[in-house]
Image: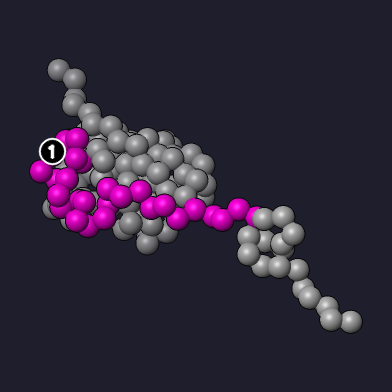
Amino acid sequence: MEKQRFYGTGKRKNAVARVWLSPGEGNITINGKPMSEYVGRRSLELLITQPFAIIDAMGKFDIWATASGGGISGQAGAVRHGIAVALTKFDEENRTILRRSGFLTRDPRVKERKKYGREGARRGFQFTKR
């Protein structure tokens, strides 16, 4: 019998993560590497595992994810979002807890585009009076 898997797509900034969740020992693999090796920062590891902590499921699921686009921080946020979506597909009762904690809402903050006639997104060129 094949192991049951649950899928969730997560997004953050310009990063997109495809996350597969299956009952297991708590192994998290991102792009073929262990989570700690891939993200390299303890704060991002804690960020990724937040959905498990909130529903008391730490170490009960194996995660296999592919992340692309953006940077490491955006990808970690996307993986967290994907894990939360997959957990709701595993058990619909998780939805209210994860929704209340804000894990199911896609973070809409993205980099503002540069406008013409300006130095960056908002900063104008330096003004010289004379």
Out of 55 and 59, give the one closest to the viewer: 55
Count of numbered circles in the view? 1
Q: In the picture provided, is 46 more to the left or to the right than 108?
A: left
In the rendered image, residue 97 lying in the magenta stretch gets the answer: yes
Quadrant of the image containing the C terminus? bottom right
Position of residue 34 measured from the top left corner of the image (x, y, whole percent)? 37, 43
Q: Could one spot residue 126 in this view of the protein?
A: yes
Query: In which quadrant of the rendered view does residue 129 lie?
Result: bottom right
What residue type is disc 1 on?
Asp
For label 1, count other residues whose C-alpha is less than 10 Å away and answer few (under 14), some (14-19) or many (20+): few
Which residues lie in the magenta part? 87-114
User: Relative to 119, is 23 above or below?
Assistant: above
Which residue, as the protein is rendered here, is positioned at the far top? 1
Query: In which quadrant of the rendered view does residue 17 lie?
Result: top left
Measuring 27% from the left and 52% from the top, which residue is drawn there?
103
Q: Could one spot residue 34 in this view of the protein?
A: no
In the rendered image, residue 3 lying in the magenta stretch gets the answer: no
Question: Mark 1 — residue?
Answer: 91
Q: In the picture provided, is 130 more to the left or to the right than 56?
A: right
Query: In which quadrant of the rendered view does residue 85 lie?
Result: top left
Report helix, strand or loop for mark 1. loop
